[in-house]
Image (tube, rainbow, N blue to C red):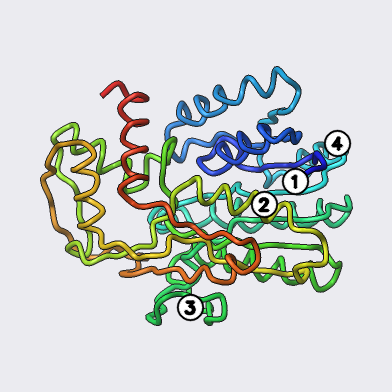
Amino acid sequence: MNSKLKILVTGVAGFIGFHLTKRLCDEGHHVIGVDNLNDYYDVQLKRDRLTQLDPYNKSGLFKFHKIDIADLSDLEEIFKETKIDIVINLAAQAGVRYSLENPHEYIRSNVQGFMNILECCRYNNVSKLIYASSSSVYGGNTKLPFSELDRVDTPISIYAATKKSNELMAHTYSHLFGLNTIGLRFFTVYGPWGRPDMALYIFTKNIIDGKPLQIFNNGKHSRSFTYIDDIIESIDRLIGIPEGVLKPYSIFNIGGEDAIELMDYVSAIEDALSLKGRYEFLPMQLGDVEKTEADSKKLEDIIGFSPKTDIKIGINKFVDWFREYSNK
């Protein structure tokens, strides 16, 4: 990307938002970051990510605003203050399991909040909106690997339903107003600075602390785990695609090329730690799926790249970060 852009990143204190902002600022783009710093997980981790972005703040490449995208008036102020070229919406209430207990928060953040983003893009001539969807939209689909051509109208959690809603809303705005939208179906993203509610963080911490690992569905899970750097590389390349190459409405899978069995994942964590875990095998959780596997060929055809980081390399990098961050 040659020309320097003004890019709004929502969910900037989140796992993906933080890494993406670092990359964009390193490339010389101006990033306006927003986040409500909610307490779904440890707020200190979010603040520590923001601290890592301080040098960009001092150099004038990064500006942070503590706002909630569900509050339209606060969001509109951001757009009045700065002419935004591209919006990358990563703000969302995350987590499948939490959505069983707090469904209203998912509608507020993921549906109302996204509606506000769409309206601000519509009225402020934003050239491109890239937004986080999720592999969870595939619901209980059994045909593997998951393809963007598959039907996705049977979500099995409110979280998945809100992500499918985002895709439908984006399609409507692309059709009615010509807004260029790109939805990204992320597949189990992991890596340094990752979320404490994700398996990698929980398993690593519990192995070190000598606590048992809760292994759901008796370990009969497999996932397309996707290393964070591969996610960032993909988004960065999509930002740089010239107008007219894609249709106004696009959806892409972004997932690791091979589905990894859960117990192989656990073994890779144990190897990285040089420690053995204790297991507590449990039945499948409500809202969960047994298998995900990404077909990312469509993405590769467009950007010349798809996620390929080896799971052992990615886990080793996470463990190195975790030990340093938590002093364990």
Dot 1: within a 10 Å radius of its alpha carbon, few (fewer than 14), some, or many (20 or more) residues?
few
Disc 1 marks a residue whose amino acid type is Met
Q: Secondary structure at mark 2?
A: helix
Q: Position of residue 13 (x, y in %)?
A: 56, 35
Which quarter of the rendered picture does the C terminus lie within? top left
Which residue was labeled with disc 1?
1
Which residue was labeled with disc 2?
113
User: Looking at the rendering, which quadrant does residue 10 occupy?
Assistant: top right
Please tell me which residue is depicted at 80% across the width and 59% down the height of the picture: 242
Most foreground residue, 241 or 99:
241
Q: Secondary structure at mark 4?
A: loop
Disc 3 marks a residue whose amino acid type is Thr
| Pointer 4 or 1: first along the chain | 1
Q: Nearer the viewer, mark 4 or mark 1?
A: 1
Which residue was labeled with disc 3?
154
Q: Label 4 to label 2, Cα distance in Å?
A: 20 Å
Which residue was labeled with disc 4?
82
Q: Position of residue 320 (x, y in %)?
A: 33, 31
Q: Label 2 to label 1, Cα distance in Å?
A: 29 Å
Please tell me which residue is depicted at 20% across the width and 55% down the height of the picture: 215
204 with respect to 185 (left or right): left
Dot 2: within a 10 Å radius of its alpha carbon, few (fewer than 14), some, or many (20 or more) residues?
many
Q: Label 4 to label 3, Cα distance in Å?
A: 39 Å
Most foreground residue, 264 or 131:
264
Disc 2 marks a residue whose amino acid type is Gly
Please tell me which residue is depicted at 55% across the width and 38% down the height of the picture: 19
Q: Label 3 to label 1, Cα distance in Å?
A: 38 Å
| Pointer 3 or 1: first along the chain | 1
